Image: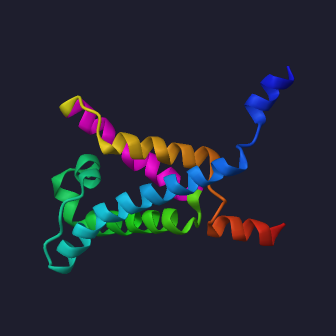
Amino acid sequence: MVKMASFLFGRAKPWADYAFVVLRLVIGIIWINAVIPRWNTLAAGKPLANGLVSTLFGPGMVSSLTLFFTILETLGAIAFILGLLTRLAAVWGVIEFAIIATTNFISRRAIDINDVLMAGSLVLLLHGSFRLSLDGIIAKKKS
């Protein structure tokens, strides 16, 4: 019974916390790298259609909502990189990547990078990443 309780409620090994840091940084870098071209086209005056916006709201709403979702994605990527509000950013990541991955799967029936990003965001949502993050610094100051 003790082994089952330690399996269900045990903490990760101290060295394993660094795996969550790497996961957080990789997702943040991939996400910010995907957002940069949209910022370039927005600055040029020709907004690049966001796949999430066109999937959810149709082509008529793409231009008005692309800036809003680009800002949200940029803030989510920066939150992952800095480790600030990681679980909140992970909620947005799970929702966004699940929608994109589902539409890609239905149309192409292939595994996409969005599937991997969704799984990584889900892991960060469930566990968090307090090592080498602003969340960890804030948690230490609160206690």
Q: How is the image coloured?
A: rainbow
Can see residue 99?
no
Q: Which residues are magenta?
A: 87-107
Give the prevailing secondary structure in the magenta stretch.
helix
Of residues 8 and 17, the one nearer the viewer is 17
Percent position (x, y) of residue 76? Answer: 45, 63
Percent position (x, y) of residue 121? Answer: 49, 48
Assign the C terminus to one quadrant of the image.
Answer: bottom right
Whether residue 16 is situated above or below residue 22 in the rendered picture: above
Q: Residue at x 74, y 29 (%)?
A: 7
Percent position (x, y) of residue 129? Answer: 62, 56
Q: Residue at x 32, y 44 (%)?
A: 113
Quadrant position of residue 100: top left
Magenta stretch encompasses residue 99: yes
Q: Is residue 120 left or right of residue 128?
A: left
Of residues 75 and 11, the one nearer the viewer is 11
Q: In the image as oriented, which residue stretches furthest toward the front? A: 15
Percent position (x, y) of residue 96? Answer: 38, 49
Quadrant position of residue 59: bottom left
Assign the N terminus to one quadrant of the image.
Answer: top right
Magenta stretch encompasses residue 68: no
Q: Is residue 3 left or right of residue 13?
A: right
Whether residue 101 is situated above or below residue 63 in the rendered picture: above
Can see residue 10?
yes
